[in-house]
Amino acid sequence: MAIWIDENTKVVVQGITGREGSFHAAQCREYGTQVVAGVTPGKGGMNQDGVPVFDTVNEAVEKEGATASMILVPAPFAADAIMEAVDAEIPLIICITEGVPVLDMVRVVHFMKGKKSRLIGPNCPGIISPGKCKIGIMPAPIHKEGSVGCISRSGTLTYEAVQQLTSRGIGQSTCIGIGGDPIVGTGFIDALTAFHEDPATEAVVMIGEIGGTAEEEAADYIKAHFKKPVVGFVAGQTAPPGRRMGHAGAIISQGQGTAAEKIEKMRQCGIHLVESPAEIGSAMQDVVAQKSS
Amino acid sequence: MKIHEYQAKQILTQYGVKIPEGQVANNPSEAFKIAKKLGGTVAVKAQIHAGGRGKGGGIKIAKNPEEAKEMAGKLIGSKLVTPQTGDEGKVVQRVLIEEGLNIQREFYLGIVIDRSQQKLVFMASREGGVEIEAVARTSPDLILKETIQPGIGWQSFQARKIAFGLGLNAKTVGKASRLMSALYRAFEETDASMVEVNPLVLTEEGELYALDAKMNFDDNALDRHPEIVEMRDLSEEDPTEIEASRHRLSYIKLDGDVGCMVNGAGLAMATMDIIKMAGGSPANFLDVGGGANLEQVKNAFRILLLDENLKAVLINIFGGIVRCDVVAEGVVQAVKEEGVKVPVVVRLEGTNVEKGREILKDSGLDFLVATDMADAARKVVQSV
């Protein structure tokens, strides 16, 4: 078991004929993901490395039965691409694209209210259920099938954490990069809720960073509802206020969103918080050892 | 992106927001002329990209053109230190000269993006001229908030709720409502990330003026607002950061001495953190991005070396899309071309890591190779 994606997930790649789209579609296929279709408006009828290309997401759903979409289109077109996938009732939409304007995302989130789709991202590495399905741009070989769920606002820092787990023999059920933007489709709590219900997930690694209050809200949720152990880390303890640290969402503004506040809150709520990013793997090892003893 | 007060006022006035009569002066004699034209008492306001100017002595009241000239002379070219500039302060390039108003009351008005609600929120307070964060801490009940429904937009009833909530009389409520609509339209149409009028003032004559104005914009939306991009003032930014942004690198200068080059924002922050934990102090944040090529790695390295405080460099790359051999090649070339004099610690992991390590070893250069992040941080701090 895993959350949201498995070996039966059928993926359409929006922007499959682009440089990024074609490369990552091929990488996902190589991992074993069923990439059933691509969409590039105006290029319907073509095929990209054997994958049929359609003009619209609707066609990809009707003709190939796509159940998930991976979006790799340029930022100015990303919001439109997401809404097209929502309109086509794709259950899971993963938007990898970085640089989507925030007000576009305000409209997208509003558009999705009452609809059947879940959005992961934008500005994220995607989602992987090791051994089953990868929809995203993460390096596959560092992952290993197992029972630890990972949720993170970061890309490469997640790879770092995953590798620390894998090198200790600890596998992962599903790893989700929720994205580094101020407004994202899936938050920590959505992912935690799914991990809570997933019997194959026994513990969770949660990686936050400065900016906003998503970590604090997740910590409250964990304290109240989440019974599986959580190892946490928050990046940006040395980040200056008022500066955007690479990610659009990683900014301490109006005195809000400091690492210190998040760390304090997460500790209070029972999360095994590590201060050094090098200790994520060993902390999870301790948690796993305690559980089995 | 940030702009100056006078620029924010130029934008808002296009939407019908009343602003005090005034003009920008680049030197004392211009200040004199503007003050003379305005007549009476004027405000002389330093134009820098930071708040807290009043506390830092950047806002003066001049009773006549001579005083305005003298104050402008003192401000222009001087370094202004405010609670928001940091100790190094900011050099004042120009001042805004504005007519004085007969102020009866001051308020706060602002629009921000509420990340938890994923919506825009209008905020107002009777405590004008005070930082809203301070009000939020001491008396949060004094802040009025109205959430803006996406797709529906700002509504008149919401404006009335705020206007009456601020204690305005029936005659002024209509004006306040129009002003709030204008702020909302300005926010939406320019892809702002923040609009603030602090203070909004009610004059003895019963008019509402934006006495101060601040607008920040979403960097991700600048491509569709060339008119906003034109307002960018490069003299307000760090030259190295400007150089980095030309190469699409995300760089932020800090005051430590351990330079770092990392791929990915989260890992870059975590690397800064672990340097600090090992007893060092990071000199910068530098994210080379997910798809960095050879040129970009070389540029990144060159930019790092522009920092005079630099005593050592830590390169931490987790190869995903970025291949370790490409990074290693870039680093070797950059070190050879630039003649690096400080120790360089390299930690590579991920795609093609063996090839990358071989390239470093075969280069004949004196790299310190680290096995993991903790080891890398230890090594770089020891080498300082």
Image (cartoon, coloured by chain):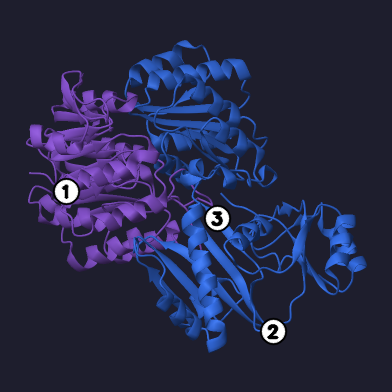
Foreground residue, B227 or B214?
B227
Report the residue marked by disc 1: A289
Q: Colour of chain A?
A: purple
Label 3 crowd bin: few (<14), some (14–19), many (20+), radius 10 Å: some
- The label nearer to you, 1 versus 2, is 2
Residue A129 to residue A118: above or below: above
Label 2 crowd bin: few (<14), some (14–19), many (20+), radius 10 Å: few
Chain name for mark 2? B
Q: Are marks 2 and 3 on the same chain?
A: yes
Foreground residue, A75 or B279?
A75
- Residue A108 in the image: x percent, y percent? 30, 52
Q: Colour of chain B?
A: blue
> Visible in this render: residue B178?
yes
Q: CA distance from mark 3 to mark 1?
A: 49 Å
Report the residue marked by disc 3: B216
Q: Residue at x 42, y 47 (%)?
A: A101
Q: Are marks 3 and 1 on the same chain?
A: no
Q: Are marks 1 and 2 on the same chain?
A: no
Q: Amino acid at mark 1?
A: Ala
Q: Amino acid at mark 2?
A: Glu
Q: Is residue B184 left or right of residue B9?
A: left
Label 3 residue SS: strand
Chain name for mark 1? A
Q: Is residue A116 left or right of residue B258?
A: left
- Residue B161 in the image: x percent, y percent? 44, 81
